[in-house]
Image: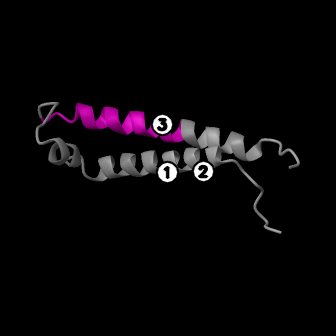
Amino acid sequence: MSSLPAVRTRFWLQSGFSVAALLLAVVTLISREWIELLIGWDPDGGNGALEWAIVAVLSVAALCFGLAARREWCRPRTAT
């Protein structure tokens, strides 16, 4: 028997999205130019407002997905 409880696929998706959002937020904090390199132009005119907004949105998304995954992890299991 495994020591990990049986969880639904939803848990793994939420966990993955949480990690991905957190990683992108950290990457944006470290190198804010990746957005300009990806899309080819500077949408905020170089003042960095877009990058800070992206960090905020990704951080909130990581938190929300993490909390949802935790709720799924703690969810009562039914016998199958």
Mark closest to the chain's N terminus, 3 or 2:
2
Asked if residue 60 is positioned above or below residue 31 in the image, the reply reads above
Q: Is 23 or 79 nearer to us in this picture?
A: 79
**Crowd class of label 1 (few under 14; some 14 to 19; many from 20; radius 10 Å):** some
Residue range highlighted in magenta: 46-63
Residue at (72% x, 47% y) in the render: 73
What residue sits right under mark 3 in the picture? 61
Among the 4 quarters of the image, the one containing residue 35: top left
Q: Label 2 amino acid?
A: Trp
Residue at (83% x, 42% y) in the render: 76
Q: Residue 70 placed where, x, y %?
A: 67, 44
Q: Residue 34 placed where, x, y %?
A: 22, 49
What residue sits right under mark 1 in the picture? 19
Among the 4 quarters of the image, the one containing residue 42: top left
Side of 39 where 59 appears, left or right: right
**34 drawn magenta:** no
